[in-house]
Image (spheres, rainbow, N blue to C red):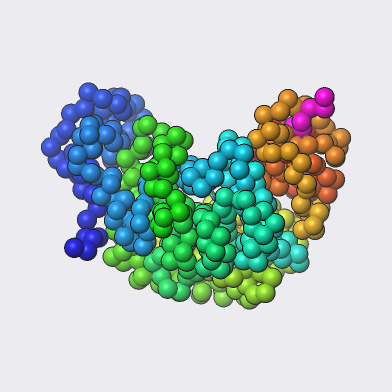
Amino acid sequence: MGANHAEAPILETLARYQDVDELGFTPPGHKHARGADPRARAVLGDAVFFGDVLANGGLDDRLTRGGVLARAENLMADAVHADHTFFSTCGSSLSVKAAMLAVTRPGHRLLVGRDAHKSVVAGLILSGVEPVWVEPQWDAARHLAHPPSTAAYDKAFTEHPDADGALVTSPTPYGAAADLKGIAEVCHRRGKPLVVDEAWGAHLPFHDDLPAWAMDAGADICVTSIHKMGSGLEQGSVFHLQGDLVDPAELASRADLLGTTSPNVLIYAGIDAWRRQMVEHGHELIGQALELASHTRTAIEAIDGFHVNDAKDFCGPGLAADFDPLPVVMDISDLGTSGYRAADWLRAHHHIDAHLFDHRRISAQLTHADDEGTTARLLTALRELAGHAAELRDAPQVTVPSPAELRMDQVLLPRDAYFAPHAKVPATDAVGRIAAEMITPYPPGIPVVLPGERLTEPVLKYLVTGVEAGMFLPDAADQRLDTVRVVAES
Ligand SMILES: Cc1ncc(COP(=O)(O)O)c(C=O)c1O
C-alpha cells in the first residue's frame, strides 16, 4: 500500500496527547506551561509550551510502540525518494557531522569542497579525518565561489584513491548548484559514497523547475535544513540515505553519538508538517514563489545601482551547473557602498533584514511564504536605499584576495592544529604562522581560515579590512581580529 501523505504522525499524536490530558511526572519541568513564568507565557504563547513534551515516555510510550517518529520519518523518505530518513533537532550542523562520520573514520581521508560550511570543518576537527580539499569553481570577477566541478572530484579521487568518499555543498547559499549526477557517478565508479550538504535545498524535491535534488541525482546521503528554505522551526534538519554503501544503523549510531537525548517535539512537528504541506501543495506553493521571484528580480534589476545575479551570471563552463532563483542575490557595487552598510541601513530605516551581505552584495531569500505584500515592502526599501546611496558612500574598502590568494596550505590536520598548544599573536605578526582556530565570516558561514592552514598576508588583510568594513567573525577567539590564535612554536 502506498504511503498516506495526508497523515502527520507527530502532529496528530501531539493533538491526541493534549486531548486526553496526558499528565507527565517527567521533564520538561514547566509541565504544559503551568510552571512557566507568566511573562514568558505572554510573549511565547502557551502553544509553545503545550507542544513541548517529552518525546519518548510522553508523546510516544517508553518503548516507542506507537512508532510516531519512525512513521513520520518513513513518510518523509517516501516524499523525497530516499530509502531512510532521520529527523534531527540539532540543525544540519549535526546532520552533516553524522553523515561524514558514517562514510569515513579517524585518520582516513574524505574529499570535501573547500566551500563547505563551518559545521563540516567542525566535523573534521572532532573526528580527525583528513580533508582532501576540492577547489570550488571561482568566479574571479564577482569574487564568488560556486560548487566544485565533477572533473575536480574526479581528479581528487585519482590523486587520493584511498579517500573514503566525497562531500559537496549544493546548492550554495547563493543558489548555485553542482552537477550532482556527475559527481555521484564519479564516486560510484569507485564504489565510494557521496554526501550532499543540501542544507539550502529543502524545497528542491517539490518543483521540477528547481535544480535536481540529491536523492534523485543518486547521492548516498543528503542533509537538509527544513528551517532554511522550508517551513520547519529553527534547528529542524533531516538526513536521507539510499543505496547500500552506507549502513543505516551506523548512520543512526553516529547521529546518536552527537545528538541530544531530549529532542524538541515542536521541531519534529515542524518537519512532519512541512512534508505533508509539500506533498499536498508543494508544486503550487513553490510555483507561486518562483513566479514571485521572477517578477521581483526584474523589478530590482530596474533599480539604479542594482544588478540581480541570475543563471546567466552563475551558470556555464567553469561556473555552476544549475541555479535556484529563490535566493535573490543583488550586486550593489554600482551604488558605491558595501553590502554591510546597505544591510544596516535597510534594518535601521525599513526594518528589513537582508540574508547574505558582503563587500559588494546583499541577498533576499524568498520562499513559498512570501507574497506581493512582502516583496512590495522589499522593493520600496531597496528603491529608497538607492536614493540614499550617496550618504552611504566612502564605506571602508575590503581588500579582497584573488581566488589563488585565498587558498592557504593545509600543513597540519584541522584536529591537530585546533587542539595544539596555541599562542595569541597580533594579526600583523601572524603571517607564516599556522592557524589554531577557524575564522568564518557569517553569513554565509564558509570559513576563510581553517585550523592547520599557514596564514598568508592577503588572507589576513582581507579579514582585517573586512572587520573594519562590517564583516562579522563570530567564531574567532578575537572577533575584532586584533589577535589571531596560532599554533605555538616549540
Ligand atoms: C551549507 C550549510 N550546511 C550546513 C549548515 C548548518 O545548518 P543548521 O543551521 O541547520 O545547523 C548551514 C547553515 O547555514 C549551511 O549553510
Q: Is residue 489 magenta?
A: yes
Up-down relation of residue 247 to residue 291 (above or below): above
Residue 122 occupies which quadrant of the picture? Answer: top right
Q: Position of residue 391 (x, y in %)?
A: 73, 57
Q: As rendered, which of 5 and 302 lies closer to the eye?
A: 5
Residue 451 occupies which quadrant of the picture? Answer: top right
Residue numbers of the magenta segment: 485-490
Left/right placement of residue 392 relative to residue 202 reads right
Residue 354 appears anywhere in the view: no
Q: Position of residue 160 (x, y in %)?
A: 67, 53
Q: Position of residue 347 (x, y in %)?
A: 58, 51
Residue 124 appears anywhere in the view: yes
Residue 425 occupies which quadrant of the picture? Answer: top right
Up-down relation of residue 394 to residue 476 (above or below): below
Residue at 37% x, 61% y is 80
Residue at 35% x, 71% y is 284
> Which quadrant of the rendered structure holds the N terminus?
bottom left
Furthest residue toward left:
20
